[in-house]
Amino acid sequence: MNLIRGVRFSTIDRLGTISLFSSFAVAMVVTIWAIYLDSFFHNAAYVGFFAAALTITGIISYIFLNPIVEKGNKANLYALTILIYIISYFLFAFFPNIYIIIALGILISIIGSLRITLFGIIIRDKTKDCSVAKTEGLIYTLSNLSWLVAPVVAGFIASRYGIREVFILSAMILLIASILFKFFKIKDSRKTKVDKNLLAPIKEFFKNKKRIYAYFLGGGIDLWWSLIYIYIPIYIFELGLNEKIIGYFLGAIVIPLIFTEYYFGKRAGKKGFKKLFIMGYSILGIAALSIFFISNIYLILLILILASFGAGMLEPTTEAYFFDIITPKQRDKFYGPYNTTADLNAFLGRALPAVILLIFPFKTIFIFFGVAMLIFALISSRAKEIIEKK
């Protein structure tokens, strides 16, 4: 524990602060990303296909970068990923053409996989076994504070000054996060034995029933976020509303998360995960299906915002559940393969609706997302219960 100006500042607090700044920068870019792509592709389905293609790159990266995670200095590698993000955002700002977008999109997908894996392992390494869900709840809460404000800021800047300025500001905020990471002296040089066969961790991962359930349950929320961050902004824009409304909506969508994720993280650690999984996915599924019958865009946005109470039950708990069912020695080996569930479900959440949009009206995708969430709720009912406090 360090004492900074009279306040105890633990390693988790420092990591939370870094997450606050880095999430702010990423959230700003995510807010305008779909619109930015649509300005080149001029078709919501094409945007979905391209975004889905990038997730394939992410999935492959989790597999082939796993040896780097196992063998490398995690703290140093994480700092490097932030630096690459900074350079990429500046390039997006000053070289806006389709070839640059494709190249940088692929690069960000690769580095993003590495960044997520490294940061997740560093957090788990610094967390006590009895406080995993609680810590995940805290980290997600701090991150979502950024996701509350950043979309509003990005929407205002994009509508007032332009999308390029959003990329520039995001790069500058990431630079602050990089400086803080260095200043806080985050260390994590733990190494493990590297598998010579790159596919061995994948094969071993799926030999365990508990890990399979954790894999399925961990990706459902990423399928949902594809609706929120890819298709809803385009839907809003096509109805004649501007970037400000998109920013306000994406900011409001995380308000329930801020007020619930820390609480649900603590509750899962004490009472168990299973009921939260079932309730969370059920809320999302019912919300999506009800939206299909509604035409008022503002009522649709309100329902999606309220549905985030269900998302708050899932974001901090699904990853904590995974860490609770594996041993410390398995973190480096299995966390990368586990993270492929995020990109796999993000791919499905972008590609399948894109196919639907080629044939059916836009609102049809709400049926797809609603049914998918209810399937995840059903899978949750079969998962083994875990209580950390025991």
Image (cartoon, grey):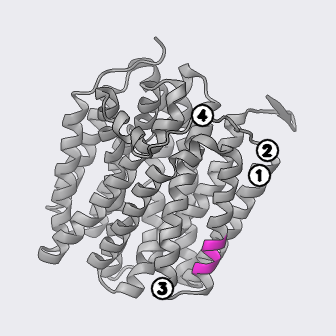
Residue that sits furthest to the right in the current view: 5
- Mark 3–mark 2 contact, CB under 8 Å? no
- First along the sequence among labels 3 and 1: 3
Front of the two marks 1 and 4: 4
The majority secondary structure of the magenta stretch comes to: helix
Q: Is residue 13 left or right of residue 69?
A: right
Q: Which residue is mark 2?
A: 184
Query: Closer to the N terminus: mark 4 or mark 3?
Result: 3
Separation of marks 3 and 2 at Cα, in angstroms: 38 Å
Asked if residue 162 is positioned above or below residue 365 in the image, the reply reads below
| Front-most of residues 307 and 380 | 380
Q: Earlier in the sequence, mark 2 or mark 4?
A: 2
Magenta extent: 87-92
Q: Which residue bears the numbered disc 1?
A: 180
Q: Residues within 10 Å of mark 1 (few under 14, many from 20)?
A: some
Circle number at residue 192: 4
| Residue 371 visible in the picture | yes
- Quarter of image, res 281: top left
Structural distance between the alpha carbons of marks 1 and 4:
27 Å
Q: Position of residue 256 (x, y in %)?
A: 44, 46
